[in-house]
Image (cartoon, rainbow, N blue to C red):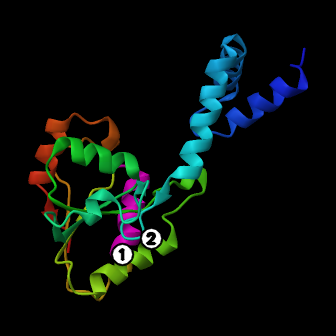
Amino acid sequence: MAFPEPLERLVQSLERLPGIGPRSAERIALHVLRSSTDEVAELALALRDARMQTQRCTTCGNVTLDSPCAICADDTRDSTSVCVVEGPREVAKMESAGVHGGIYHVLLDGYAPREGAEPDPSALQTLRRRVDDGLVQEIILATAPDREGEGAAALVLEALQGTAVSVSRLARGVPAGARLEYLHSEILAEAYRGRRNDA
């Protein structure tokens, strides 16, 4: 039997979220029905605020309340070293590992052929402009060692062709197929310290 129309719409909306299949969408929707009115209102408010109050940093592309973000605005960070990551979760992971004292460049959705997504062309163009401005001396490619991450890295390397910037990659310690957001901080720190030149 089909769900009532409002519940069916909720299930269909949840299914559009990444990683949520039909069964998970149904479980979440039914959980919402069991929740108090206050809890549902709090969830709706959190969704609205996250969408309406955050923005992308105009310098690095990370998610922030204010632009430039706190990392880009911090003049104690090494602005000559730019760590290129696929998304905001990777910035958070790198920051929690405490290994990168420079700044970042976020490719947003990364390269995910299974989902039909690629790095935002404007993110690649902005990275190239940052390098062409002459301040950036090192690009650290911190994309995941899986098909999507390697695809993103290839597009970054293509965007940087013809520049003299030094490019390195995260090295040992990151297992093939691993996502940075799930790595232990010590593993990430070792991979960062052991990065290699990619040119």
Q: On the image, which quarter does residue 129 sit in?
A: bottom left
Q: Is residue 31 left or right of residue 189?
A: right
Give the residue type at disc 1.
Answer: Leu
Instruction: Please name the predominant secondary structure of the magenta segment in the image.
Output: helix
Look at the image and say whether residue 31 sits in the magenta stretch.
Answer: no
Assign a secondary structure to mark 1: helix
Q: Which mark is residue 92?
A: none
Q: Position of residue 195 (x, y in %)?
A: 14, 57
The residue depicted at 66 percent of the width and 26 percent of the height is 41
Q: Position of residue 107 (x, y in %)?
A: 42, 62
* Residues shaded magenta: 146-158
For the residue carrying disc 2, how many other residues have a C-alpha within 10 Å: few (<14), some (14-19), or many (20+)? Answer: some
Q: Is residue 130 left or right of residue 139?
A: right
Mark 2 = which residue?
123
Q: On the image, which quarter does residue 2 sit in?
A: top right
Residue 145 in sight here: no
Q: Is residue 47 above or below residue 84?
A: above
Q: Is residue 115 above or below residue 24?
A: below
Assign a secondary structure to mark 2: helix
Pick the front one: 31 or 175 = 31
Mark 1 = which residue?
127
Give the residue type at disc 2.
Answer: Ala
Q: Is residue 113 above or below residue 34?
A: below
The residue depicted at 60 percent of the width and 27 percent of the height is 42
